[in-house]
Image (tube, rainbow, N blue to C red):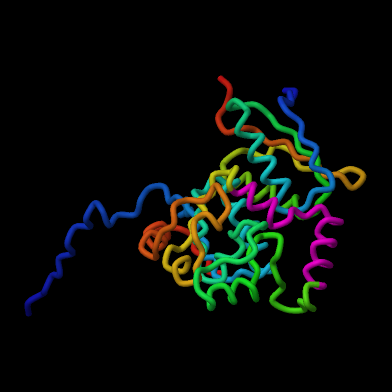
Amino acid sequence: MSVTTIERPPVAESEAQPAEKKPEVAEKLVIFAWSGELDKIWPTLILATTGAAMGKETTVFFTFWGLFPLVKNQVRITGENWMQKMLSTMNRGGDEHLKLSKMNFAGAGPAMMNRLASEHHVASPHELMEMAKDLGVHLVPCQMTMDLLGLKREDLIDGLDEPAGATLALAEAQGAITLFI
Amino acid sequence: MSITIAMSLDLKGLSCPLPIIKTAKAMKQLAPGQMLEALATDPGSVPDFKAWSKATGNPLLESDQSGGVFRFVLQKQGELK
């Protein structure tokens, strides 16, 4: 009777358990700001400023409806053709003209929400946007949506990164915490 | 060992995320080993300061409350030697 001995291959050095297991911590935060509504942009900016305050390299990629909060508050009509102009008439840009996704009541909802925020010393989206810039958060407008919606660089606020595309957004998202809001 | 506070921040009345953002900015001005004291009234700042300390590696040496005011003492990362 023969005995078969199975020889185990030696454990490769790279497969061996590391002596000290460090918890994996994402050093980056990337938020895709797709919605332009007050109740979505607000948490987006709260998370972005907090991420930067936690030392994470933070990027907010503004696309589609998310671009309108970047329009300067004093800019009323944007776009070159009648469709783009009508869009900006129906959906005014600027971080001081945001609507609620529910209970908007023709602007009464946001007015009440802003009043509550002020009474509770909660920073407004406008203040948070300024803080985000101050903290070095990368605020990146989506070039394709700017072209589609007729938003020009001069329609948008100062302090933004250069407009870019999905590739830059996804490249930044590698190894990052990613949120789509 | 007595704790010497290098900077004190009054964050009373402020809501999330302002206490942490102002603290993070102030901590940048400190030298390694220096202490920062922060006073806040937002109850959410208790778990937030703990989490910020853990995430950034700046030790939270004290976290207590008196009369509705939360007091935190953070030490900038790196010991004075």
Quarter of the view holding residue A76: bottom right
Q: Relative to A94, is A154 on the left or the right?
A: left
Q: Relative to A19, is A160 on the left or the right?
A: right
- Residue B26, percent across and down? 66, 34
Quarter of the view holding residue B36: top right
Residue range (magenta): A108-132
Q: Residue furthest right?
A: B67
Which residue: 58% across, 27% down? B32
* Pick the front one: A52 or A63: A63
Q: Relative to A179, is B50 on the left or the right?
A: right
Which residue: 21% across, 55% down? A12
- Residue A171, percent across and down? 37, 59
* Pick the front one: B78 or A156: A156
Quadrant of the drawing holding the C terminus of chain B: top right
- Residue B77, percent across and down? 57, 33
Which residue: 64% across, 73% down? A89
